[in-house]
């Protein structure tokens, strides 16, 4: 039983180290290459992007603040962000980055599983 506890502690330490590393990095839209717009919604759009330095693929949700304020949905957007940051389940997409582009928009980046990436680009039918 002691081995399992040590393994869990090591996994937790690795997750915490990765989280702190990501938290320290200051990113912007310029750190990503837009590949494709994959959806539009009430507050903005979702783009498929690739991080330039790592090649990892993310869904970038760009939200217009004015629309959120007008429709009084700020609390819902914040709750969604908080849940996705804390989520640790195989069926919930983890949020990796969240930043403000300017005073008018907010960006949330979530990691996209490779199978979804391939489906979006039509390589799997």
Image (cartoon, rainbow, N blue to C red):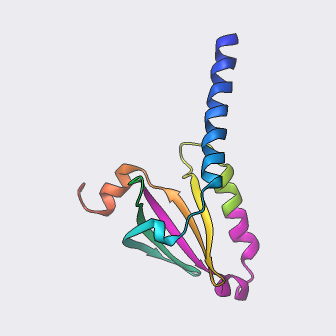
**Quadrant occupied by the N terminus:** top right
Q: Residue 101: where, in percent of width, then height?
A: 59, 76
Left or right? Give the position of 39 relative to 64.
left
Asked if residue 65 is among those painted magenta in the image, a careful observer would answer yes
Q: How many marks?
A: 0
Question: Is 76 above or below relative to 70?
Answer: above
Q: Is residue 30 above or below residue 69?
A: above
Question: Residue 90 is drawn in which quadrant?
Answer: top right
In the displayed structure image, the side of residue 57 where residue 108 appears, left or right: right
Q: Residue at x 72, y 77 (%)?
A: 73
Which corner quadrant holds the C terminus? Answer: bottom left
Give the quadrant of residue 16.
Answer: top right
* Residue 36, image x, y percentages: 36, 71
Instruction: Identify the residue shown where x is 41% and y is 53%.
Output: 56
Region of the chain picked out in magenta, as a range: 57-80
Instruction: Report x, y in % for residue 92.
Output: 57, 50
Instruction: Tell me which residue sits at (61%, 47%) in the image.
Output: 21
Residue 60 appears in the picture as rendered: yes
- The percent coordinates of residue 14 (x first, y second) are 61, 34
Q: Nearer the viewer, residue 16 or 66?
A: 16
Q: Is residue 104 magenta?
A: no
For residue 33, above or below residue 88: below
- Taking the spot 67% from the left edge, 62% from the top edge, the residue there is 81
| Residue 1 makes an appearance in the image | no
């Amino acid at each position: 039983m002691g081995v399992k506890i040590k393994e869990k502690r090591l996994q937790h330490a690795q997750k915490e180290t990765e989280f702190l590393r990501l938290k320290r990095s200051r990113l912007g839209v310029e750190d990503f290459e837009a590949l494709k717009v994959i959806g539009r919604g009430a507050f903005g759009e979702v783009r498929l992007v690739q991080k330039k330095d790592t090649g990892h693929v993310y869904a970038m949700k760009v939200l217009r603040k004015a629309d959120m304020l007008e429709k009084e949905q700020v609390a819902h957007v914040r709750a969604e962000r908080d849940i996705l940051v804390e989520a640790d389940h195989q069926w919930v997409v983890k949020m990796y980055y969240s930043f403000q582009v300017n005073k008018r928009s907010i960006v949330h980046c979530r990691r996209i599983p490779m199978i979804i990436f391939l489906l979006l680009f039509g390589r799997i039918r």
